[in-house]
């Protein structure tokens, strides 16, 4: 079955799912586009805050109905509570028109670039921080949002302590580090609570961090996403106007297979892919400066060609990158003249 045909089948199946008021979910205005990927069928439902419990049954019923038509694809439904969007949905007398629901711009933010990876541990957070700093070195005003609910790392990478302040009107005032505004989902978690931040809680928290933070006037907000493709990604691409996404991969084949899955998700959700970065691309010997391609190199460049996206450059595997990351003193900020920092600056150049 083609993706389009399956999408229609899913929409038809949603006719059989009733909202709390009795109307079918298929014509609910808070329903996002239905996304069909190689492995999954996914969509988001935007609801008013406080209605999470009553929509749990809707979600369950929708999962059941879709499972009947989706074959072996995973069904991923994310429920996001959003006061403004939900009110709009309620005020819309007409059933929603085909096409994605309008995405409100984020106040004060010109561009939003998401950094993604197919799998964990490929250096996505390290790349996010240094890429953001590289944009800043180009003269941009930059902010960074750590959206990795499974392993938030910005507080450590940027040496930030404490929670962001909240104004009387409930808007966050972000922390600042190296001239960048920084918000981390980590600052909203206690200890090892991260694992329970799934589904509606995580996606609503992310929406809140994006929309209810005083970013000031910035050129680019860089978002460090969780690894892979899940609820958070689906909810983000449905509710935030992304300028584009960068996919980070290591050169090994198995990492590249996952990177292609992430690229596939962005393509299907109409998020422009700015390109692929190959991290730990080659080894720069700290004592002699000699380059060796210990993992093989060029894998990401080749993969980029195959899927028709731009290759943005390689970042060397270098002890200094790791040590400075661990110390909260990222290399682009603290050793901007080094070859390693220049690799990040080249990536920032390449997206323009
Ligand atoms: N180019 C590099 N050279 C040396 N070490 C690196 C490089 N890139 C990342 N690292 C190190 O590899 C580890 C993983 O990096 P990082 O935390 O950025 O990955 P991630 O993809 O964000 O991981 P996660 O999936 O856990 O969020 C860290 O210890 C980091 O310092
Ligand atoms: Mg990370």
Image: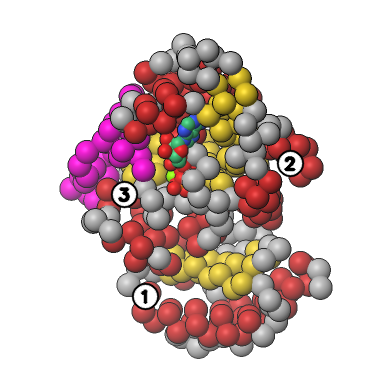
Q: Does the magenta stretch include residue 319?
A: no
| Left or right of 335 in this view: 288 | right
Q: Magenta segment, which residues? A: 153-181
Q: Residue at horizontal 74%, vertical 73%?
A: 6
- Mark 1 sits on what residue? 51
**SS for dot 1:** loop
Residue 308, relative to residue 206: is it above or below? above
- Mark 2 sits on what residue? 303
| Left or right of 218 in this view: 291 | right
Q: Position of residue 93 (x, y in %)?
A: 54, 72
Residue 136, quarter of picture:
top left
CA–CA distance between discs 2 and 1? 43 Å
Colouring style? secondary structure
Work out whether mark 2 precedes mark 1 in sequence or the reverse, and give the earlier one.
1
Asked if the residues shown at circle 1 and circle 3 are in contact, with their CB atoms under 8 angstroms apart, the answer is: no
Residue 242, quarter of picture:
top right
| Residue depth check, mark 3 versus mark 2: number of the one nearer the observer | 2
The numbered disc on residue 186 is 3
Tally the marks: 3
């Amino acid at each position: 079955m083609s993706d389009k045909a399956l999408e229609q089948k899913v929409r038809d199946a949603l006719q059989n799912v009733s909202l709390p008021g009795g109307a079918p979910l298929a014509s609910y205005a808070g329903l996002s586009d239905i996304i069909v990927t190689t492995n999954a069928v996914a969509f988001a439902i935007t609801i008013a805050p406080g209605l999470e419990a009553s929509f749990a049954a809707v979600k369950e019923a929708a999962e059941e109905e879709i499972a009947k038509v989706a074959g072996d694809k995973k069904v991923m439904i994310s429920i996001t509570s959003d006061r403004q969007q939900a009110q709009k949905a309620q005020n819309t007398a007409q059933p929603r028109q085909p096409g994605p629901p309008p995405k409100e711009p984020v106040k004060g933010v010109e561009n939003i670039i998401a950094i993604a990876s197919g799998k964990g541990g490929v250096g996505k957070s390290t790349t996010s921080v240094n890429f953001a700093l590289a944009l800043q070195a180009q003269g941009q005003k930059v902010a960074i949002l750590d959206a990795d609910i499974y392993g938030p790392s910005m507080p450590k990478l940027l040496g930030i302590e404490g929670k962001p302040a909240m104004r009387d009107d409930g808007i966050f005032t972000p922390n600042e580090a190296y001239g960048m505004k920084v918000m981390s989902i980590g600052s909203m978690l206690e200890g090892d609570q991260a694992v329970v931040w799934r589904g509606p809680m995580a996606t609503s928290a992310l929406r809140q961090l994006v929309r209810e933070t005083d970013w000031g006037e910035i050129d680019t907000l860089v978002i460090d996403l969780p690894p892979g493709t899940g609820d958070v990604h689906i909810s983000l691409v449905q509710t935030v106007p992304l300028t584009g996404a960068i996919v980070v991969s290591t050169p090994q084949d198995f990492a590249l297979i996952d990177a292609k899955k992430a690229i596939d998700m962005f393509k299907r959700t109409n998020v422009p892919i700015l390109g692929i970065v190959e991290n730990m691309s080659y080894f720069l010997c700290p004592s002699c400066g000699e380059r060796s391609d210990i993992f093989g190199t060029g894998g990401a460049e080749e993969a980029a060609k195959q899927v028709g996206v731009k290759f943005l450059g390689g970042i060397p595997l270098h002890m200094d990158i790791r040590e400075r990351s661990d110390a909260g003193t990222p290399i682009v900020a603290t050793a901007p003249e080094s070859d390693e920092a220049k690799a990040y600056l080249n990536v920032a150049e390449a997206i323009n």
